Amino acid sequence: MAELTPMMLQYLQIKKENNDSILLFRLGDFYEMFFEDAILASKELDIVLTGRECGNGKENKAPMCGVPFHSVDNYISRLLAKGYKVSICEQIKNPETNEVIDRNVVRTITPGTIIDPSMLDEKVNNYIVCIYSESNKSALCFCDVSTGDIFIDNVVYDNDKNIINELGKYSPKEVYINTIRTKNSILFSYFNKNNIVISEYNISNNHEETIIKHFGKTIEQLKINNYLSVKALGELLNYLFITQKASLTHINKLQITDKEKFLEIDSITWRNLEIVETIRNKDKKNSLLGILDKTKTPMGARLLRKYLEKPLYDVSMIIKRQNAVSEFVSKNIERSHICELINDMGDIERISAKVIFDTINPKDMKKLAFSLTSLPIIKDSLKSFSSVLISETYDDFDELKDIHELIEKTIVENPPITIRDGNFIKTGYNSEFDEIKFLLSDTKQIISNIEQREKEKTGIKNLKIGFNKVFGYYIEISNSNLNNIPNEYIRKQTLTNGERFFTQELKDIEEKLLEASEKSIKLENKIYNDIKNYITDNMKRIKKTAEMISQLDVFTNFAEISLKNNYICPIIDLNDVIEIKNGRHPIVEQIITDEIFVPNDTYLNCTNDKMLLITGPNMAGKSTYMRQIALIVLMAQIGCFVPATSAHIGLVDKIFTRIGASDDLTAGQSTFMVEMTEVANILENATKKSLLIFDEIGRGTSTFDGMSIAQAVLEHVTLKISAKSLFATHYHELTGLFNNTNGIKNYNIIVKKRGNDITFLRKIVPGAADDSYGIDVARLAGINPNIIKRAEEILKTIENNEINNTIKNKNKSESDQISLNSSEIDDIMNELKNLDISVLTPVEALNKLYVLIKKSQNI
């Protein structure tokens, strides 16, 4: 095989160092890919696969494909969307000669480290998460490189399920995880199921050093309270430094999530309540976020989502948010003015972050400047506010006038997208640059003057001076006038109809102009770099102002939707009471079109009204009612107003839901197992301050098993946990067992029946339902009338049999009954006597109950 060319040797060396990514190798105006990368990219991007000779012989032809540099972002975005990593290898040029002297990878882009706003959903953070595990314990660190957000939980996770609960809210695009994990764990199944790109690492040793060097603070000053979180943060920073090859100065504020200050929502509840997307269509529009998000800026939209991800468990902070929203509700003029000012504002966070990675272009700079234009007016609009959060914003609000003025003074009004060809710096900013620009702009007149002088000197009227990139400036003379050329003319090029010449004067001017042009480009680049350096040095100020704009956007948004949707400010305190008057489901009331939404009251506490046991037919509105309460509590604890005429919300520390079930085939779990697993999670983690929602416990097994489990769960929740709960069931027998005892209150949804027709009145009232209306619902659903008729006949037969069996059982003689001394009953009794329930977990108790029920049925 022939020897490889130096360029191809260089490619192979760089590829070896970046073997886990597709290497885009810059050659002139194209990014080329070779060998395996070329074959893969040609298929994934649907581009032509060609070949390139890479040695001294034709047999050394390498597979190759390429994309133009000016449209590379589109191709990168497509590769990232398919889960690939992409390394960008640029040409390094000599600043003096502009010749290529080397090539280096300037950045590796992964699905979790995208910074280009055009590749991202502007309203959603793009997270990468680092999971550090050691001795069956784990810590998490999240970062959005495009905005500079970075946070850790001061929590050590002892099982994968809790990690998955946390990941479910943030939907990371990439996970960076140490190789201690096994590929067959439920965690890896979760990654694969949710298309999360996995990057593995070997543990390094310089975690503390990396953190201190980057943030300029000690671990104690950063308030990180466990060594696993230190390692997760350190590993993630190391990964970002290696892949991004930048200072990452915009990642300058580490947020510590103190779990005790936030309402916890597990991934199941997050999905069941449809907080950011619907269960069926994964659609944002008809989710809670879709209803609440009328924000004006991408930054505000992302902050609102963060509020939903981390609702507060802090009365004082919630009230501060409420007061801010209340002021915006009452100050219509100021609110409207601020909304108008921020409406056209760009994404300050993500645009400024592009400076750090040296990917910001002059058009981006102008967008940034435009976004800063309104800051002084926004600050002035806040001076009359008295609420704590808005007053603090006014006092600390940085108008960033210096940055705005710098960009406005330097960048032309309509700059080019790239800095490659210059012409993006204004005249009047730099005197040296102005002189050069004047010389270059006056070139046309200078050449015109020379041309006129030469015409007069030679008497050749059709003499003309031209220019091309190959030959530079020249004097063109037709063949008929060649006898009249002066001696100082030097022949340059022969044409069919004439010849081209140059003079020493023309050559000197050409050299001077070319030198000026090169100097102009260098000077423009220097000025542009100075601007970028200034912005980089002031990144903390920019980020802080962006955060304040985001907060104003969310508060004005809350005020606008509260006025539009008739929301009220709830009372918030630490009592155990949830009292809602005329509460409404915030999503359903907005999307129903064929009927008026019926509001309902709610009263819950941890003593006499711990649990509402709700009965009624399917479609009557039980699930809507229960979800409605959870969503109202959630809205209240993010500081938003709520859909009701009045509300008193005692803070809830956790919300759990057990709603519906489906087989989880990927985990090898049946419907019933999924249901029991979710119930077990609730029973193990709920506290007295939690809000629990159970919708149809025990449906996935036989009637008696299901009813027994439902009763046992109901008893445990009310007697052991004493949490505020809502429990919807079709086991009407339970309503008789718990008739206003142990804090359990029976409620039902009113149904009006006329003959065979039923009407759901959607109103919840005290008392148990008198019928399940199952056949009536089937009739409404359009089941064939003959089948309905047959079902009614079967129901009557079953009911008559039950009555007859009851009579027979009452008349049974004692001699016919099973002896109480039978061995089977003795076994069960002994098992019960020796059972110590104080040492059983809820799951073990359920399993034990299930076994005993099975044994009793076999007697």
Image: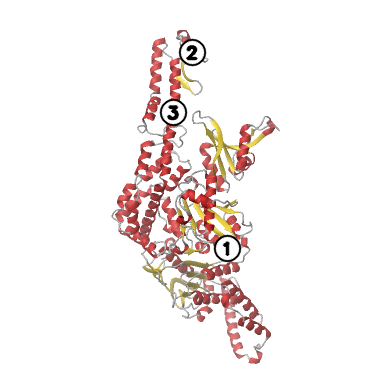
User: Relative to 749, does residue 823 appear above or below in the rendering?
Assistant: below
Q: Amino acid at mark 2?
A: Ile
Above or below 789: residue 394: above
Residue under circle 2?
490
Residue nearest the viewer, comparing 858 with 795: 858
Question: Which quarter of the rendered picture does the N terminus lie within?
Answer: top right
> Could you say whether the residue bearing mark 2 is in a helix, strand or loop?
strand
What's the image's color scheme? secondary structure
Amino acid, disc 3: Lys
Please report contact status of discs 1 and 3: CB closer than 8 Å, yes or no.
no
Residue at the location (42% across, 36% down)? 528
**Which label's residue is closer to the chain start, 3 or 2?**
2
Return the disc, 1 or 2, that comes first in the chain's sequence: 1
Kind of residue indicated by mark 1: Asn
- Would you call the spot at circle 2 few (<14 residues within 10 Å), some (14-19), or many (20 or more)? some
For the question of whether residue 572 can be seen, the reply is yes
Identify the mark at residue 159; answer none if there is no mark. Answer: 1
- Residue 713 position, x and y percent, is 54, 74
Badge nearest the viewer, 1 or 2: 1
